[in-house]
Amino acid sequence: MATCVRRTLVALHRATCSGLKSAEASLDMQLPVPLFLPVRTKRRFFIPPAVGSKGSKTQNVEAKARAAGVVVRQEYMERPINISCTAGIFDPYVPPEGDARLSTLSKEGLKQRAEQIRQSAASQLAIRKIKDHDSDFSTKAFAQQAQEIFVEAHNALAQFNKEKLHSLVTERCYPEMTRGNRYKTIHWTFVESLEPPRVVHARCPEMVSKGNLYGQVTVRMHSKQTLAIYDRFGRLMVGSEEHPKDVLEYLIIERHLVNPYGRWRLHGKIVPSWAPAKDPVIKVTTCSALADSIYLLVKKRQRS
């Protein structure tokens, strides 16, 4: 019975297919032609040399381009430079050893004071040049202005205010202040000034051409500050917010004198060779690592 039904279905299928083919032939129907679109492949950076070109002289590419009418722009191997600030500190001030600790009435203090008076001749000449371009310059008022620039710059650094920080520090000082501060939280406060700031050094160097003057003034600042740096997990790395420290700093404030729109900005600091070492970074370990180290220490003692 199943064989008869199968034969009937096969015969019906053949008859249907032949009927459809005859209908297509009578209606003159055409199947759609497949559509081919030309696609440009990615240009290869390395083009293999042609056959037989090995050993021949290399031809000038620019000459070929000019012959084809293609204008080749000349490339200059130059880099832009920034002349709004200098690249370093000219004739840096050498702080006397024991500064802020020796009394001026002692023998060593009197020697240091006499040496400062001898070295102040070059500073007076530089201050005279600065006053030629900035008539309102005064050493007493400038020392207080330098301290305000220092406080505002460090507050902008703690708040990550890049625009304000660029207006307060030079292009040389900016990367030195911001290097390594990513993913860290900085809490800095200026508590009080232990001694009034004063100008101790001044230089007026020239750069690039004669007459292109820059003013560099060194300001001695003795103050009390607090600093605390936390990592991205909120763990304390350096310093403390509760215990202020006495800090003696020598700030370099610079200005491009010939620029009528120039301003005094923080350029760097002078760290004396006799200055105490910085506090080490606090290393934070996990509980598992601490437990492993204790376990190894106990095992070592048991073996001995």
Image: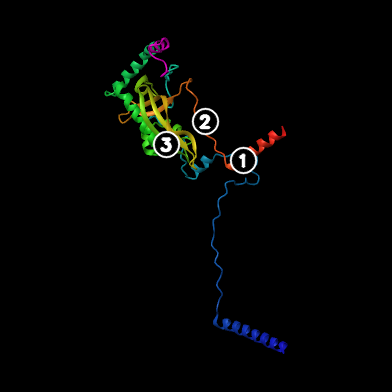
Q: Amino acid at mark 1?
A: Ala
Gap in angstroms between the C-alphas marked 1 and 2: 24 Å
Mark 2 / mark 3, whichever is N-terminal: 3
Quarter where residue 79 is shown: top left
Q: Residue placed farthest to the front in the image?
A: 302
| Front position among marks 1 and 2 | 1
Q: Nearer the viewer, residue 14 or 133?
A: 133
Q: Which mark is residue 280?
A: 2
Which stretch appears magenta?
A: 99-113
The residue sitting at the left extreme is: 135
Q: Earlier in the sequence, mark 1 or mark 2?
A: 2
Which residue is label 1 attached to?
A: 291
Q: Inspect this view and state whether residue 301 appears.
A: yes
125 vs 39, left or right, is: left
**Dot 3 and dot 1 residues touching (CB under 8 Å):** no
Quadrant location, the N terminus = bottom right
In this rendered view, identify the residue nearer to me: 255 or 240: 240
The local secondary structure at tag 3 comes to strand
Quick check: is 67 in the magenta stretch? no
Q: Tag 3: Cα neighbours inside 10 Å, few (<14), some, or many (≥20)?
A: some
Looking at the rendered structure, the secondary structure element under dot 1 is: helix
Alpha-carbon distance for marks 3 and 1?
Answer: 32 Å
Mark 1 crowd level (few <14, some 14–19, many ≥20, 10 Å Cα) = few
Separation of marks 2 and 3 at Cα, in angstroms: 17 Å
Which mark, by number, is residue 187? 3
- First along the sequence among labels 3 and 1: 3
